[in-house]
């Protein structure tokens, strides 16, 4: 009973977190109020790992950074022990002011933002400020964010799919999620790039919350 209730609550929480990686329909119109000074004619350059969007004036730069991005993705495949389910979408901007005008992210982009990985569609946005070494560094940095998000999303989706099928989040390809218990060695699942079970050190807090949220109502239900 305790395992079922805790597992259900944990997996539902994981589902809510996973929904952060899925684009809600209403979110597609965000950013339309940004001022766009220059219309851009976008093209696409594809490698085994990367789908790079660029505009015609930056084709030479795009071809150079595509080689770098592909190499980084191969490196991160091994480092994160992950085989991505789709190519990494990258938007390359030849200048920072063009990056600030983008509608690819709902929020406003400040002058101090060197690059970003947005959560709605998982796109990596990279501006070029004239420095090749800086562009390479930003590409590696943002791709690390993309792989971290992809790894966490993959683990959470697997846990949830297992729970829907069997009532238990455990299964092949994911770390063991221990059953809930009331003993002294209570563990919880930390969802991270390296997801793992850890010993719970704040159990008293959750037991206190249980006394509040699981308190019987006047009709006898919880």
Image (cartoon, rainbow, N blue to C red):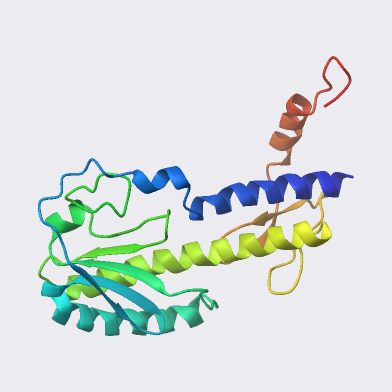
In the picture as drawn, the residue positioned furthest to the top comes out as: 218
Residue under the image location 68 percent in, 42 percent down: 202
Q: Position of residue 69 (x, y in %)?
A: 32, 79
Task: Identify the residue shown where x is 32% and y is 72%.
Answer: 140
* Quarter of the figure that contains the N terminus: top right
Q: Nearer the viewer, residue 188 or 153?
A: 153
**Residue 38 quadrant:** bottom left
Viewer-closest of 43 and 158: 43
Instruction: State the quadrant of the C terminus.
Output: top right
- Answer left or right for 75 relative to 64: right
Position in image of residue 138 (x %, y %): 26, 68
Q: Is residue 221 left or right of residue 93?
A: right
Q: Could you tell me residue 183's position as x and y percent?
A: 86, 48
Q: Is residue 169 visible?
A: no
Residue nearer the viewer, 113 or 46: 46
Q: Is residue 113 visible?
A: yes
Tell me what residue is drawn at x 80 percent, y 24 percent.
Answer: 215
Q: Position of residue 12 (x, y in %)?
A: 68, 47
Number of numbered discs visible in the structure rendering: 0
At x 76% / y 47%, what residue is drawn?
8
């Amino acid at each position: 009973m305790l395992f079922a209730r805790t597992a259900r609550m944990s997996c539902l929480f994981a589902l809510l977190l996973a929904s952060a990686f899925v684009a809600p329909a209403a979110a597609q119109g965000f950013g339309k109020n940004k001022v766009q000074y220059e219309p851009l004619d976008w093209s696409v350059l594809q490698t085994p790992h990367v789908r790079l969007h660029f505009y015609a004036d930056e084709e030479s730069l795009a071809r150079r950074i595509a080689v770098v991005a592909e190499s980084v993705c191969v490196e991160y495949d091994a480092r994160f022990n992950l085989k991505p389910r789709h190519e990494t979408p990258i938007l390359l901007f030849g200048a920072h002011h063009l990056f600030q005008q983008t509608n690819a992210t709902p929020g406003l982009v400040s002058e101090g933002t060197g690059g970003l990985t947005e959560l709605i569609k998982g796109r990596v946005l990279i501006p070029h400020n004239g420095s090749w070494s800086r562009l390479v560094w930003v590409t590696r940095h943002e791709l690390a964010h993309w792989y971290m998000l992809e790894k966490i999303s993959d683990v959470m989706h697997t846990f949830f799919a297992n729970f829907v099928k069997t009532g238990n989040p455990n299964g092949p390809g994911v770390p063991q999620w221990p059953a809930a218990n009331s003993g002294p060695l209570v563990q919880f699942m930390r969802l991270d790039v390296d997801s793992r079970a850890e010993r719970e050190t704040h159990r008293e807090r959750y037991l206190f919350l249980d006394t509040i949220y699981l308190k019987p109502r006047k009709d006898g239900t919880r």
